[in-house]
Amino acid sequence: MEIIISNSSNKAIYEQITSQIKGKVMKGELKTGDPLPGIRSLAKSLHISVITVQHAYEELQKDGFIETIAGKGTYISLKNKDFLKEEQLRQAEDKLQEVVDIAKTNGIGLDTLIKSLTLFYEEE
């Protein structure tokens, strides 16, 4: 699993880790039951503190993306399907808001937007 840490990012390192793992889950690159590297192993490969990786894993677990089984390791959660669906809906809503803002700014009517959305949705 590749995670890229940027020193020039405005995000904290643990947030960079959590957002990249969440992104991989949502894109299907990481699937339910897939193992994650151990905290020490990931910290060593990224050249960061174990505490930082632990913080990232705690956030991911709190959000339902991962679960840790004592003595076995950390895995992509079996429980994250509903959360993923909700997160994907939120992302779609964000994109739709951008479209609505552009349409309003440029005088594009709701009927035109609905026709366009319908065409995109029904397109194979």
Image (spheres, rainbow, N blue to C red):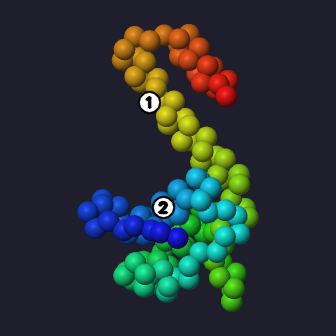
Residue 5 at what x, y percent from top left? 36, 68
Q: Is residue 2 above or below residue 90?
A: below
Q: Secondary structure at mark 1?
A: helix
Quadrant where the C terminus sits is: top right
The reply to whether the C-beta atoms of the residues labelled 2 and 1 are less than 8 Å apart is no
The x and y percentages for residue 121 are: 64, 26
Query: Which residue does the image show at 40% across and 10% down from the upper left?
Result: 107
Amino acid under label 2? Gln
Residue 124 appears left or right of 102: right
Circle 2 Cα neighbour tier, 10 Å, few/some/many (<14 / 14–19 / ≥20): some
Pair 2/1: label in front: 2
Q: Label 1 is placed on what type of residue?
A: Glu
Relative to 100, say whether 61 is above or below: below
User: Which labelled disc corresponds to residue 98?
Assistant: 1
SS assignment at label 2: helix
* Of callouts 2 and 1, the N-terminal one: 2
- Work out how far the residue at label 2 is from the one at label 1, CA to CA, in angstroms: 23 Å
Q: How many marks?
A: 2
Quadrant of residue 36 within the rendered picture: bottom right
Q: Name the spot of residue 39 as percent of width and height, x first.
A: 52, 82
Q: Pointer 2: what residue?
A: 20
Residue in view at x 26 percent, y 63 percent: 8
